[in-house]
Image: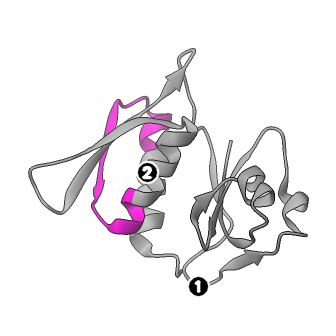
Amino acid sequence: MKIKKTLVDMFIRIKNNSQNYKKSVEIIKTKPNIKLLKFLYDEGYISGYSFSNNKSKMFVYLKYQNSEPLIKNLNFISKPNKEIYCSVKTLSQHKNNNSFYVLYTQKGYKSIMDAKLQNLGGLLICRIN
């Protein structure tokens, strides 16, 4: 999978709007964005998402805990011009108790813990803390 500019744009919008304590953010509707939003929802980092009447847009509902955003900081590991792949053996190097890593594997988006349990390597996308 290539890191698309729409994926980077989505993450930047989520990060900036959560730091400004907005309830929702409008993003471009693409299949990779929808799959990643489903993963973030399942992991508990966003409250949800919905599709707008405009076929090319959708809304992401941001999540806060104790008046603090769950996505405070987001650092890209892979970028459109430089992708970083990780094997199963090297996944433990990226384990950090304060951070959550998003990994794209053959079976979709996974956390590092899930990827290790399923013996999968893949493309490191970003770190959320």
Q: Looking at the picture, how far across and down is residue 23, in whole percent? A: 34, 30
Which residue sits furthest bottom? Answer: 81
The nearer-to-camera label among 2 and 1 is: 2
Q: Earlier in the sequence, mark 2 or mark 1?
A: 2
Label 1 belongs to which residue? 81
Q: Is residue 116 above or below residue 46?
A: below
Residue 9 appears left or right of 75: left
Q: Secondary structure at mark 2?
A: helix
From the viewer's perspective, is 100 left or right of 20?
right
> Alpha-carbon distance for marks 2 and 1?
23 Å
The residue at 80%/59% (across/down) is: 116
Amino acid type at circle 1 is: Asn
Whether residue 94 is situated above or below residue 129 in the rendered picture: below
Identify the image quadrant of the C terminus.
top right
Label for residue 37? 2
- Where is residue 21 drawn, in percent x and y? 43, 29
Instruction: Specify the farthest residue to the front.
Output: 118
**Number of callouts in the render?**
2
Where residue 40 appears, as percent x and y from the top left, is 51, 46
Q: Position of residue 24 (x, y in %)?
A: 32, 36
At x 37%, y 58%, the residue is 34
The answer to whether mark 2 and mark 1 are in CB contact below 8 A is no
Furthest residue in direction top, as rendered: 66
Q: Which residues are magenta?
A: 16-34
